[in-house]
Image (cartoon, helix red, strand yellow):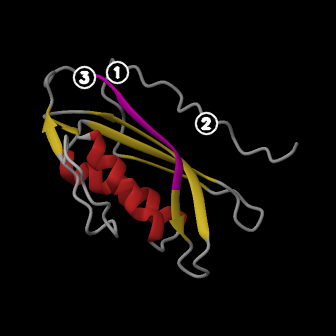
Amino acid sequence: MLGRPTEAPTSPGEARLERVPNPHAGTHYLVRFAAPEFTSLCPITGQPDFAHLVIDYVPDRWLVESKSLKLYLGSFRNHGAFHEACTVDIAKRLVAELSPAWLRIGGYWYPRGGIPIDVFWQTGAAPAGVWVPDQGVAPYRGRG
């Protein structure tokens, strides 16, 4: 998809995640993607839900191609699923495609019905020696 016009996928199942060889295979380092304007739909009401996603991973042999990731995340815009399903499904799809040394996702969802929901998932402990900074997303405070 890189370097050419690409139609936006209509669903996460239709979306293609592309990978490229890791130019530093054998070296543990952290890659971070932040998606502060992620959207999906409530599967019950059809109303939009909004989240700030932070995806951290330590690549092994593969990197995710960022345009394909952007299109994949955008495919959730018309997809009905609960916050927990969206967050964990994204992480598990990346793990399936990339087989990273480590991956974690933080889904910081904006309030629905007055309650913000944050969803966190990771594959296990980060490899020794990898600098893993805080995800940098403040807890929801409302007007307070």
Image quadrant assignment for residue 112: bottom right
Instruction: Determine the secondary structure under disc 1.
Output: loop
Nearest to the observer: residue 143 or residue 66: 66
Q: Spatial distance from mark 2 to mark 3, Cα to Cα?
A: 24 Å
Instruction: Determine the secondary structure under disc 3.
Output: loop
Looking at the image, which residue sits at the far right?
Answer: 144
| Amino acid on which the number 1 mark rests in the picture | Val
Which residue is the site of mark 1? 130
Q: Spatial distance from mark 3 to mark 1, Cα to Cα?
A: 6 Å
Q: Are marks 3 and 1 in contact (CB under 8 Å)?
A: yes
Nearest to the observer: residue 67 or residue 89: 67
Q: Spatial distance from mark 1 to mark 2, Cα to Cα?
A: 20 Å
Find residue 42 and report its horizontal and vertical position in percent.
Answer: 57, 73
Task: Report the span colored magenta.
Answer: 28-38
Of the residues tagged 1 and 2, which is closer to the observer?
2
Nearest to the observer: residue 87 or residue 101: 87
Closer to the chain start, of discs 1 and 2, is: 1
Which residue is the site of mark 2? 137
Closer to the chain start, of discs 2 and 3, is: 3
Q: Are marks 2 and 3 in contact (CB under 8 Å)?
A: no
Which residue is the site of mark 3? 28
Closer to the chain start, of discs 3 and 1, is: 3
Q: From this view, report whether residue 130 is shown above or below residue 54.
A: above
| Amino acid on which the number 3 mark rests in the picture | His
Q: Label 3: few (<14), some or many (≥20) within 10 Å? A: some
The residue at 30%/64% (across/down) is 9
| Amino acid on which the number 2 mark rests in the picture | Val
Image quadrant assignment for residue 48: bottom right
> What main secondary structure does the magenta stretch of the protein show?
strand
